[in-house]
């Protein structure tokens, strides 16, 4: 019908075709969160960036033994290698490298970003750790050094052999560029420091060199702490009586080869080996130390137990059983070896 107007009433449950307005608090919160995220992003980019991308001069950064990650991070920040100690700690945790930071000398530069510096500290030490157990001979020390450095075993043996007995057993941080002579100096300086702290008996029946030989014998013959002063007493008692020491360790030293430096269960034929070190064949002390003794063996050499023992035999557990005469010794052999 002309002029008739239709009107459509909007149902009450249908919203108007426009967006609902956000609450002001939501908008403000979202803006703050966005600003915070952007701030963290740009801070992290700044904190992990190099101090000076154009300065690639390598510097040696030294981490002393026992220094914590927090202290290392503070030193790096204080010395201008990194921008933020906090970023250093966060990235360490993220990479799970806290425990990998070790003492040593490291090359770093101002052109390195934070991840590169952390990688260098975790894996790029200019040094290596060398552990020398008590009782090793110089050839064993040489083999350990050759595995961790560019030095050959032979180079070290040539430099170290005259100092057998003075290559003090300990754990060392050795510079990669150290020569054989440098390493010998490090080990013997440590020995001199330890040995000079000991109180030598007065009057001295044996010279310091002879005491070191005795200590090397004790180190190889006594596997347990309690046996060291007792083995020392047997050595002293035999020397005082002019008896041959008859120590297997001296023959083992004479027979030592790269594949077996300390032969076990020596045969009767081996005990007749022609060597100045064979204390079955030659009374008195061998001409030089047979191993490198630790502090406890040196102390036992200086202060032996007061006994009448002249013999001992080792059981399967490495413990020694002592006797004053051959009859008691034979009984111990029957009891502990048969």
Image: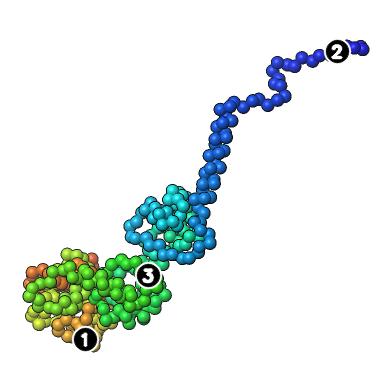
Q: Which residue is mark 1?
A: 276
Q: CA distance from mark 2 to mark 1?
A: 132 Å
Q: Which quarter of the rendered picture does the C terminus lie within? A: bottom left
In the picture, measured across the screen, residue 28 lies left or right of residue 72, that is right
Sooner in the amino-acid sequence: mark 1 or mark 3:
3
Q: Position of residue 119 (x, y in %)?
A: 47, 59
- Give x and y (percent) for residue 284: 14, 82
Q: Residue at x 20, y 83 (%)?
A: 287
Marks counted in the figure total 3
Residue 175 is tagged as 3
Q: CA distance from mark 1 to mark 3?
A: 37 Å
**To which quarter of the image does residue 189 belong?**
bottom left
In the image, residue 50 above or below residue 276: above
Query: Could you give the CA–CA distance between mark 3 and mark 2, rounded to whole angstroms?
Result: 100 Å
The x and y percentages for residue 244 are 14, 82
Residue drawn at point x = 37 percent, y = 70 percent: 175
Which mark lies nearer to you, 1 or 3?
3
* Residue corresponding to mark 2: 5
Label 3 vs 2, first from the N-terminus? 2
Marks 2, 1: nearer the viewer: 2
Q: Residue at x 39, y 78 (%)?
A: 152
Q: Quadrant of residue 168?
A: bottom left
Circle 2 packing at 10 Å, graded few (<14), some (14-19), many (20+), is few
Q: Is residue 267 visible?
A: no
Q: Which badge, 2 or 1, comes first in the chain's sequence?
A: 2
């Amino acid at each position: 019908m002309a002029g008739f107007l239709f009107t459509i009433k909007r149902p009450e449950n249908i919203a108007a075709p426009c967006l609902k307005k956000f609450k002001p608090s939501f908008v403000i919160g979202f803006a703050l969160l966005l600003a915070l995220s952007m701030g963290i992003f740009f801070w992290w980019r700044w904190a992990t960036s190099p101090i000076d991308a154009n300065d690639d001069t390598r510097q040696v950064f030294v981490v002393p033994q026992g220094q914590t990650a927090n202290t290392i991070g503070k030193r790096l920040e204080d010395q201008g290698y990194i921008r933020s100690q906090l970023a250093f700690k966060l990235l360490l945790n993220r990479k799970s490298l806290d425990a990998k930071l070790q003492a040593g000398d490291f090359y770093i530069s101002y052109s390195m970003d934070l991840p590169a510096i952390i990688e260098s500290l975790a894996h790029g030490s200019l040094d290596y750790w060398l552990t020398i157990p008590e009782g090793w001979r110089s050839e064993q020390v040489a083999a350990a050094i050759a595995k961790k450095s560019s030095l050959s075993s032979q180079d070290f043996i040539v430099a170290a052999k005259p100092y057998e007995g003075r290559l003090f057993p300990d754990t060392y941080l050795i510079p990669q560029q150290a020569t054989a002579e440098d390493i010998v100096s490090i080990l013997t300086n440590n020995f001199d420091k330890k040995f000079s702290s000991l109180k030598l008996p007065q009057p001295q029946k044996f010279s310091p060199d002879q005491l070191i030989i005795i200590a090397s014998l004790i180190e190889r013959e006594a596997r347990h702490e309690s046996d060291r002063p007792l083995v020392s007493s047997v050595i002293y008692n035999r020397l005082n009586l002019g008896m041959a020491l008859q120590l297997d360790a001296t023959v083992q030293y004479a027979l030592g080869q790269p594949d077996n430096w300390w032969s076990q269960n020596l045969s009767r034929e081996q005990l007749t080996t022609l060597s100045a070190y064979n204390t079955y064949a030659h009374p008195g002390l061998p001409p030089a130390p047979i191993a490198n003794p630790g502090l406890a063996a040196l102390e036992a050499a200086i202060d032996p137990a007061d006994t009448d023992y002249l013999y001992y035999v080792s059981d399967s557990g490495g413990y020694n059983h002592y006797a004053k005469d051959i009859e008691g010794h034979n009984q111990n052999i029957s009891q502990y070896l048969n």
